[in-house]
Image (spheres, rainbow, N blue to C red):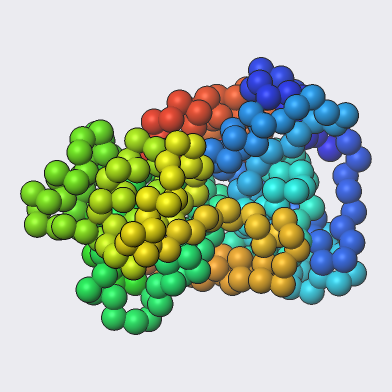
């Protein structure tokens, strides 16, 4: 089978390789890949990769057909269409067939296209864990008195976090920097949109908002750290998917603010029993995509899995100006 991997930290090292099609064991299933999405984590993982004995196979969103199952796998039947976000410790979806643990997989949406479905697993799992597990938001409770500030609302995770927060009843403030992105986040349900290239404190204070209950840091936190510390409410929660380089967590101490990291791969990377929650989140997502209560965030689609399409799609994401998600249809 064909697979596409890098041999060093440069995108230019991406090449096509051949290997035998693997056979699943245990709770693994073998999926014939029909669609995938490119994420910032692909780029970050590649940039941290040093020359190795074998190529690094990226890809952390997958959609495909189950073609074989391990002896302990019983969730899916041959021929089932499934989608998933993958496991950071294993080869990803830049290949014809992928082995994946069935516990982090779900049946794909029935009526939503591959293009719209393949973009959604990683960002939805990340946003779900941020809201429900890190911010401890109960989506069934009355959250109308709670406000969340989502920094980088037009990005992949921000685009789904806005929707999930609105479904949970929160007041959503999202940041966006261009007219196109402002319209994008408004259409996804943001109540208020502010420009992250301008002073967030000033903008919110002018709107009569002195502070917020929750803040999601979905881009570089350092340029916004002063604003985050000022705007978060005492006993609020700040959660992020990116690193802190110059910012000091201790700045949040005086307000007794809870701080939480989110890395969507933690459960599968450490083979935790809780990894089954990811299959559950994705099952719920499939239904919501089909009934229209969640909108797909696909904005760019490439066709054909090869070095050229993977390179072009990655360059688009790596530009840092993406709105929504980039998908490749095999």
* Residue 250 at x, y percent in the picture: 43, 52
- Say which residue appears at 88% left-offset and 44% top-offset: 21
Which residue lies at the image location 50% right of the left edge and 52% below the top edge? 123
The image shows residue 274, relative to residue 311, as above or below, that is below
* Residue 207 visible, this angle: yes
Q: Would you say residue 162 is visible in this rendering? A: no
Q: Quadrant of residue 196?
A: top left
In x, y percent, where is residue 30?
Answer: 80, 55
User: Which quadrant of the figure contains the N terminus?
Assistant: top right
| Whether residue 246 is situated above or below residue 187 in the rendered picture | above
In the orientation shown, which residue stands out farthest toward the top? 12
Count of marks overlaid on the render = 0
Q: State the residue in front, 273 or 290.
A: 273
Answer left or right for 189 relative to 55. left
The residue located at (32%, 41%) in the rendering is 224
Where 130 falls versus 277 (above or below)?
Answer: above
Q: Quadrant of the C terminus?
A: top right
Task: Pick out the residue farthest to the bottom.
Answer: 141
Nearer to us in this view, 245 or 175: 245
Q: Nearer the viewer, residue 110 or 71?
A: 71
Q: In the rendering, at what x and y percent does residue 209 appear?
A: 14, 58
Q: Position of residue 126 (x, y in %)?
A: 51, 56
- Side of 23 where 300 appears, left or right: left
Please name the residue shown 70% across and 48% down the image: 88
Left or right of 64 on screen, residue 295: left
């Amino acid at each position: 089978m064909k697979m596409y991997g890098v041999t060093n930290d440069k995108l230019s090292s991406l090449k096509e390789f051949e290997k035998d099609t693997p056979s699943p064991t245990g709770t693994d299933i073998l999926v014939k890949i029909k669609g995938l999405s490119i994420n910032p984590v692909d780029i970050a993982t590649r940039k941290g990769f040093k020359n190795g004995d074998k190529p690094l196979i990226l890809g952390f969103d997958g959609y495909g057909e189950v073609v074989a199952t391990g002896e302990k796998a019983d969730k899916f039947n041959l021929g089932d269409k499934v989608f998933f976000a993958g496991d950071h410790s294993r080869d990803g979806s830049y290949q014809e067939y992928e082995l994946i643990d069935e516990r982090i997989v779900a049946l794909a949406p029935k009526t939503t296209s591959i293009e719209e479905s393949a973009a959604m697993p990683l960002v939805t799992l990340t946003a779900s864990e941020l809201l429900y597990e890190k911010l401890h938001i109960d989506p069934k409770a009355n959250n109308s008195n709670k406000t969340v500030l989502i920094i980088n609302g037009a990005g992949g995770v921000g685009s789904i976090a806005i929707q999930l927060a609105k479904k949970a009843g929160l007041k959503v403030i999202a940041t966006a920097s261009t007219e196109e992105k402002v319209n994008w986040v408004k259409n996804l349900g943001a109540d208020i949109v502010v420009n992250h290239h301008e002073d967030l404190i000033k903008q919110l204070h002018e709107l009569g908002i002195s502070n917020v209950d929750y803040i999601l840091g979905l881009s570089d936190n350092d340029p916004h750290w002063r604003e985050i510390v000022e705007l978060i409410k005492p006993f609020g929660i700040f959660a992020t998917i990116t690193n802190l380089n110059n910012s000091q967590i201790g700045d949040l101490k005086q307000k007794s603010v809870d701080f939480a990291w989110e890395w969507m791969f933690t459960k599968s990377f450490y083979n935790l029993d809780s990894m089954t929650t990811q299959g559950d989140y994705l099952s719920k997502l499939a239904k919501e995509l089909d009934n229209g209560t969640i909108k797909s965030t696909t904005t760019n689609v490439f066709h054909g899995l090869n070095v050229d399409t993977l390179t072009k799609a990655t360059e688009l994401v790596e530009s840092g100006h993406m709105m929504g998600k980039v998908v490749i249809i095999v």
